[in-house]
Image: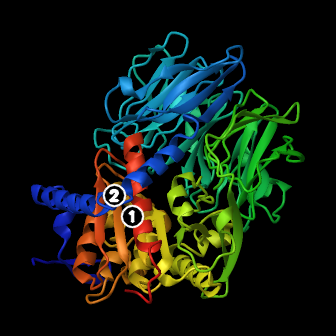
Amino acid sequence: MNTTTVTVGTVTFDDAYTWLEHDSERTSDWQRQQNERTDGVLRGLPGFAAILDGVEAADTGRGHHDESVGAVPTGGRSFLIRHLDGAQVASLWVQERDASEPRLVIDPAVRGQHFALATVSPSPTGRYVAYTFAEEGNTLGATIRVLDVDTGQDIAPDVPLAAHTDIAWLPDESGLYCTAAPDADVVDSVKRILFWRPGAAEAVAQELGADLTVHVLLEVSSDGRFVGALEMIDVAHRRMRWILDRAEPDRGWREFLPAGDGACSGAFVADTYVAVVTGGTDRGRIVAIPVTTSGDESTWAELRSESGLTLSDLSRAGDWLVLQAYERGASLVEILRLDGRVHARVPLPTGSVVWPGALRTMALSDEVTMTPVNVRFDGGIWRYSIGEGRLTRLRPPAAQLDDAVVTEVVATSADGTQVHCHLLALKEFGGEGPRPIVINGYGGFGAPPLLRYAGWWRPFLEAGGMLAWAHLRGDGAFGRDWREQGRYLAKQNTYHDLYAIAEELIARELTTPDRLGFTGLSNGGLTAAVAIVQRPDLFRAVVPEVPITDLMRGVNDPYAEFAMSIEYGDPRNPRFSDYLYAYSPVHNLVDGTAYPAVLIISGDRDANTPAWHGRKFAARLQEATTSPHPVLLRVWEHTGHGAGERDIRRQYRAEIVAFFMEHLTGPRREGRS
């Protein structure tokens, strides 16, 4: 076997699988053989067809499910992302206040096969919608289009190269700001800000005087005077970095706050910026920052001091502010007056989570729309009228697990930190002895609790299985300290937390190692790969979904380089190289070890965690393991960072369920056979 000697930072190592990093003919043949093997193993299982049917039934619910894109008051319109039964991808619909049913406005299928909506941004009155498509699950190279909702016609020349874009409209709809790549190198992580006016032949570059990284979000004040550019710190936290005063265009963009890792995000109120800030706090506080003296913290006014709530974000809804926060891992939404005083708390469904982007406000409206989710129900659209103080369910959840119960389990991690998980089971199986359990976890990027509707797991649940959602350090719902304790040189805490939860479930005789599994997506896929390497004794089956597995060479991909810089550290930096190498999954597999059953999932169009990570890990793991349990690789075609299209999504999920059922729900095994 040919090996390549590689030096990264302070570490030198031999790598026999660099060839799998490239999409060559040799690699394609090898990947095809791996997919064929996975087909034979999983599709050949006696119960696979029934599992697929069960997943399909849960996926469709009552035929479709909707997400709110935004309630638009002036035009009396609301926009919905609708997942209609039979459609491969979601489409955009508009609901007029005086109409009984919504009407279709954007159907990605018209564009061609494997296209899906990526970004949707209605203008303030709903007259226009700016949007982008993703092709084959990949937003790189996308273009921004602007639709006239009344005529159904695009009115703008495409703004090119809008990968990972954000869009912000002026209140009078005279134009929009967006972020886009500067040239034809669509994987370049550097961006610029563009401005486009309806009717203009092209967008105009807004020179910032600084490079923008992959994720920059834009915000416009309700009067249209200020435009802010917020740098994304992680999944849920942003920092206002630059500002443009449109009343003084000659001044151009200026720095609002210097670079830093503390969040600062909120809404403009007259000539102040009211924001949640995390610098110097664990849970965050609310301050009013004068725009003209933003860099001088002595001029800031504190509106709300730190408390037991983990503050996440503020947005503007008419003459009100809407606060998103977390309490014991669940979402909390409060309505604030413009001076920060609490006006009301929105009565969300118990234990639900409103993900970033799933709560929508409009600067000219006192209405809030949201799509809360829970492990027992899938979405539903809710509207809260601040003026009336009334929460209305516009559309019920598409599906529910009415016969499920959720309990909490608390464990003690290696350093004494208390960690917990939520455990779901069907009521009819309550109180029985050791059972199959699949833990799901993420543990990174300051993410909110990734609680998702568990309906597609129903075949596993009906076989007596249970699901556990682990709250691991690195996530963001329990404060800044919790997030920092699972980041950079403290990343091992994330994995210790997982092992503590697994061992607690075993100690309580809820399960045994031969009936315990783990799965995680993206950063959670890395967590899964690390668990395979570090604790092969603890799990019988593991599924890393779209993982990064080579922490030494991941920086060769532009997006992964950005992600590593905000979560793991740069292996080229001597400060991080030894630490990263010590837990990088590909580099720590040991020959002659009995590893668990493993199903590695990647997408062939994934720009976030490219498929070569899955390929290298599968090849090295297949070489190292001595157990009889399979190591399978599935690389989905026409797929990006997670399953997208309807048929692929259902097969993707069915394979995961079938894999765990095969290895966890069979006759009880003694030891690790």
* SS for callout 2: strand
Q: Amino acid at mark 1?
A: Pro
* SS for callout 1: loop
- At x 15%, y 60%, the residue is 27
Q: Residue 62 in the image: state x and y as whole percent.
A: 58, 36
Q: Is residue 174 left or right of residue 360?
A: left
Which residue is nearer to you in this view: 653 or 665?
Answer: 665
Q: Residue 152 in the image: state x and y as whole percent.
A: 48, 13
In contact (CB < 8 Å): disc 2 and disc 1: yes
Q: Residue 582 in the image: state x and y as whole percent.
A: 39, 84
Kindly identify which numbered label has been placed on residue 80: none
Q: Label 2, on which residue?
A: 602
Q: Residues within 10 Å of mark 2 (few under 14, many from 20)?
A: many
User: In terms of image quadrants, where is residue 93?
Assistant: top right
Q: How is the image coloured?
A: rainbow
Kindly identify which numbered label has been placed on residue 547: 1
Which residue is nearer to you in this view: 451 or 399?
Answer: 399
The C terminus - image quarter? bottom left
Q: Amino acid at mark 2?
A: Ser
